[in-house]
Image: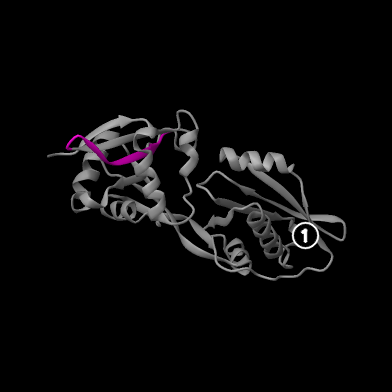
Amino acid sequence: MSFEVRRIEGPEIAGLRARRVEEMSGQVVHHSIHQRPGWTVTHGLELDGGWVGFGSIAIAGPWTGRPTVFEFYLDPVHRCRAFEAFEAYLKGSGARHFEVQTSDGLLTVMLHAYASNVVSEKIVFADHQVTALAMEGTSLRQVTPMEEVREAMRRRRGGGEWVLEWKDQPVGKGGILFHYNEPHGDVHMEIDEAFRRRGFGAFLVQELKRCCRELGAVPAARCNVGNTASRQTLQRAGFAPRGHMLLGDIPR
């Protein structure tokens, strides 16, 4: 039998989506955009009267006018027919672009088989080790009230902000965002230009990682491929590259 592609709501394939996240085994960058009304469209793959897979496209926000497939999952039992299933999905969904996290092995294969103009946009980092960097005279001050941080974690939207101070003056700021799958928190930071290249960035990332773990979350991070300074800062603070975010076009 052929795959039937039908538009569906998230709850109908919640189990399949959970299995996809489990297979990716780490932070899933676009996991929570389904919570934003009108931002995504999901199609289920039906075979012999049951759901065996699904795919999702992003259609709003940064993807307005660029229907972009960012999720595709097929039950392992049927993966011998993966290309047939994906071609049926492309025809039914109207996807014109790819945005793929390389820890999603199945969709990465589909990108390399069907996409043109493939580029790496970001590097995705995972927490690799606990560091013990020291900066005399520095302290981290939490700006966002703890109840707001906990609410952001519960809703998987928003996050918290902190300020790094050295000798009682602010030298940088950063935060943790919870727009991703539990239990991950995405660490970001910025050091004032006058204080860069002095170790404050790596120290701030280290301390934000510590705050993330104390909240019961798992630190993660991303940076643009060409941002060498940020990449080196993340690695000095104990992050290690986990994969890439790849972009590509689907030829008509």
Left or right: where 43 falls relative to 26: left
The residue lying toward the viewer, choosing from 234 and 43, is 43
Residue 84, position as x, y percentages in the image? 18, 46
Quadrant location, the N terminus: top left
In the picture of the structure, the residue carrying the numbered disc 1 is: 194
Question: How crowded is the residue under tag 1: few (<14 C-alpha within 10 Å), some, or many (20+)?
Answer: few
Residue 238, position as x, y percentages in the image? 60, 67
Going by the numbered disc 1, the residue's amino acid type is Ala
Residue 131 in sight in this render: yes
Seen at 73% across and 50% down, the residue is 162
Quadrant location, the C terminus: top left
The residue lying toward the viewer, choosing from 150 and 118, is 150
Seen at 57% across and 63% down, the residue is 231
Left or right: where 109 falls relative to 156: left
Colour scheme: one colour
Left or right: where 84 falls relative to 210: left
Q: Residue furthest right?
A: 168
Q: Residue furthest top?
A: 38
Residue 20, position as x, y percentages in the image? 37, 49
Seen at 84% across and 65% down, the residue is 137
The residue lying toward the viewer, choosing from 210 and 194, is 210
User: Quadrant of residue 50 in the image?
Assistant: top left
148 within the magenta span: no
Q: Which residues are magenta?
A: 48-59
Which SS class for mark 1? helix
Seen at 60% across and 63% down, the residue is 234
